[in-house]
Amino acid sequence: MERPTGCARGHEIRGAGDDEPRMLVKRVVQSPEQETLKEIYGIILSGGQSRRFGSAKAQAALDGRTLISHVVARLKPQVAELAIAGPTYGEALPMLDDGAHGGQGPLAGVVAGLAWAQRKPDAAWLQVAPCDMPFLPLNLVAQLRDHAMAGRPIAIADARHTQVGSALWPLACGTKLVEILSGDGKRSLTQAFERLDGITLDASQLELSGSFDNINTIEDLARANKGQPEG
């Protein structure tokens, strides 16, 4: 995937192991229109246990629709094809099973998604999103795609943390992620992202059409239904 060119402005970008920031040029997005990118496939992670919420978050209602349906509506137009890693909760999309890595958390869902996308002849990247992020940016894929570099995952960092649960993963990293899942070390998405020298973009330097506010608790859901930002 080529680096962006054309009319642009620069901003800091760091690899997970970098000591010094590098400058990449950000192509100015003329409008927040959703883009379908033929080489990018997508999955929604829905297999979490929702301990803090108390029940399946994906089925919780926001503005009369389930949380997962909000994520589907925002991510599906941005990718060539969309699937769900975990229960589909009534969404008419392919359901992916974690297989031999079942019960090992969201990283297992990403591995299942990469294996699914690798069977698509034109696929090169996998966009991931959690099922509890109903305001997912409508131009997330385009922003990550514009700064992607071969062989390295890429995610956006906001004021809270790096949003590795909404990262763009190269299909080429599937073998390495299987090794991480099969090893004795930590198996978190964050650890995997760092081990693969993930690229982090600064949200304050991007023009995002949405946010990474997610629903972790009943109180979060109540605020969202009232139109209040995440506390």
Image (cartoon, rainbow, N blue to C red):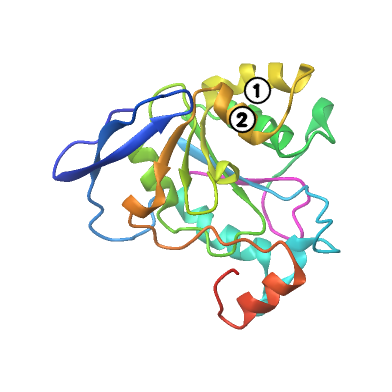
Q: Position of residue 228 (x, y in %)?
A: 56, 78
Instruction: Specify whether 184 is left or right of 222.
Output: right
**Which residue type does callout 2 highlight?**
Leu
Q: Position of residue 161 (x, y in %)?
A: 54, 47
What residue is at 40 percent from the left and 23 percent from the top?
150
In this view of the protein, which residue sits in the foreground, 166 or 229? 229
Instruction: Specify whether 4 is left or right of 110.
Output: left
The magenta stretch spans residue 85: yes
Residue placed under numbered mark 2 in the picture: 114
- The answer to which quarter of the image holds residue 4 is top left
Magenta span: 80-93
**From this viewpoint, which residue is outermost toward the front?**
19
Q: Tell whether label 1 touches label 2 (CB within 8 Å).
A: yes
Q: Please tell me which of labels 2 and 1 falls first in the chain.
A: 2
Measured in 3D between alpha carbons, the distance from the residue under mark 2 to the one under mark 1, in whole angstroms, is: 10 Å
What residue is at 60 percent from the left and 65 percent from the top?
70
**From this viewpoint, which residue is outermost toward the bottom?**
226
Main secondary structure of the magenta stretch:
loop
**Which structural element holds mark 2?**
helix
Mark 2 is surrounded, within 10 Å at the Cα level, by few (under 14), some (14 to 19) or many (20 or more) other residues, namely: many
Instruction: Specify whether 82 is left or right of 19.
Output: right
